[in-house]
Amino acid sequence: MKYFFVLGANPTLSIAELSAVFGLNNKNTECPTGRLASENVFLIESNKAIDSSALIKKIGGTIKIGIINPSNSAGKQEALQFGGQAGIKDYDGIKNNITEMLKDEQSEGKFKFGISYYGKAKFNIKPLAMEIKNYLRERGISCRWVTSREPTLSSVVVEQNKLTGKGIEIVLIESEGKVLIGRTLAVQPFKELSFRDYGRPARDDYSGMLPPKLAQIMINLSGAKADDIILDPFCGSGTILTEAMLMGCKNLIGSDISAKAIDDTKKNIEWIIKNYELGIRNYELLNIDAAELSKHIKPNSIDTIATEPYLGPQRGAHDINKTIKELENLYGKALAEFKKVLKKDGRVVMTWPAFVPPLAELRRGKPALRFINPNLSGFKIINPIPEYLRGDKKLKLTGRNTIIYGRAGQKIWREIVVLRQ
């Protein structure tokens, strides 16, 4: 079975997460394989069915999950050739494939359908939509075409119109001179993510404003399993811990030098447990300095560390050089402690700050981002992208195999760093 994943705003980070979740490997025939079909769509081929509804709630970097239609009534391959360089013209082939997908659809009320096209070739969706509409009406099915100003429907539009349940979102994907046709199975739960981000009782921009989606990605990059002991030594308001709980992780430790952060984390954990009716989770909160972890946590006892330390001043002017030195000292001491408490095969996933220099520095030709270089204490930065995918020029990593996460206008971006001993 071949599945498609519509990637988030940072496709490289999304692919890194999917690679970790599925253990992508083109050398082991028992492992799923994946490839980038277009700029923001990733394909994964798996012998096992994917529970898309459950998976979409546990991966932060994917907007939609769907399945590629394996055949069509004309007996062609699943990938239809483009009918000319100017654009996609094989409406008959595409229509036949889609009507094959729709042949068993039944609807007591109005059946809704939408079409999303992911590709660069010119493609006018309207004639195809009219063909589908006529086909459904000929079968006695009352229908409505759900439209958008964009060539793709957002997850919000898909969810609001119930196109993964009572209706259908048909997805066309341009890939290597062909068009793949599939249907969306699940979309990112944007309401839940927003609720957990803005609805939680304790939010503090100093202790941390890590988005739940990024917390999910970091946990997945760590390779944490349900029974592993996961440590967040800069737990802030507890986003990584609460997301780990929702993802099924059972053994959690959070620590922070700030007593307020520990109190905020406790409030947010209790709120998550109540709102999501979670069973009792084994968690511990410690009000300690990350530079003294080994005094409170047993050596070689932690399976995974996922954390976002203090990233520096978020507002106002500050001396970037001074901030970098202070953070390098903080992170260096923390990494030395991580090495003591982490198991030998354990992994660390951290965010490091990447500073946008003042305009004056940019005019003098300095790089657009300033990075930190803490003492790694024997850890090595590892590339989160599978080796067989690293030649794809669409994937963007730094020179030290990390991934930059941010958006225009931010003074501090995040550098996603994966470490192991």
Image: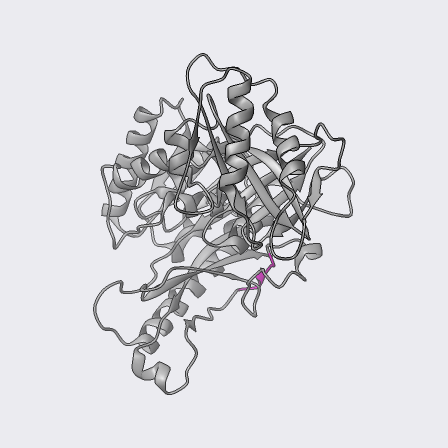
The residue that appears at 33% across and 58% down in the rendered structure is 310
Question: Which residue ends up furthest to the bottom in the rendered image?
Answer: 364
Relative to 127, residue 374 above or below: below
How is the rendered protein coloured? one colour
Image coordinates for residue 72, horizontal then vertical, percent: 70, 30
**Picture quarter with the N terminus:** top right
Relative to 417, residue 243 above or below: above
Say whether residue 93 is visible.
Answer: yes
Out of 275 and 363, give the one closest to the viewer: 363
Q: Is residue 421 left or right of residue 234?
A: right
Residue 237, quarter of the rendered image: top left
Q: Which residues are magenta?
A: 377-383
Out of 409 and 88, give the one closest to the viewer: 88
Relative to 216, residue 372 above or below: below
Relative to 361, residue 384 above or below: above
The secondary structure making up most of the magenta span is loop
Out of 44 and 331, give the one closest to the viewer: 44
The residue that appears at 41% across and 85% down in the rendered structure is 365
Image coordinates for residue 25, horizontal then vertical, percent: 71, 46
**Picture quarter with the C terminus:** bottom right
Image coordinates for residue 411, horizontal then vertical, percent: 31, 66
The mark total stands at 0
Image coordinates for residue 194, horizontal then vertical, percent: 32, 39
The residue that appears at 39% across and 28% down in the rendered structure is 161
Question: Which residue ends up furthest to the left in the rendered image?
Answer: 316
Q: Is residue 80 left or right of residue 318?
A: right
The residue that appears at 67% across and 56% down in the rendered structure is 389
Out of 35 and 234, give the one closest to the viewer: 35
Q: Is residue 340 magenta?
A: no
Say whether residue 249 is visible.
Answer: no
Residue 264, quarter of the rendered image: top left
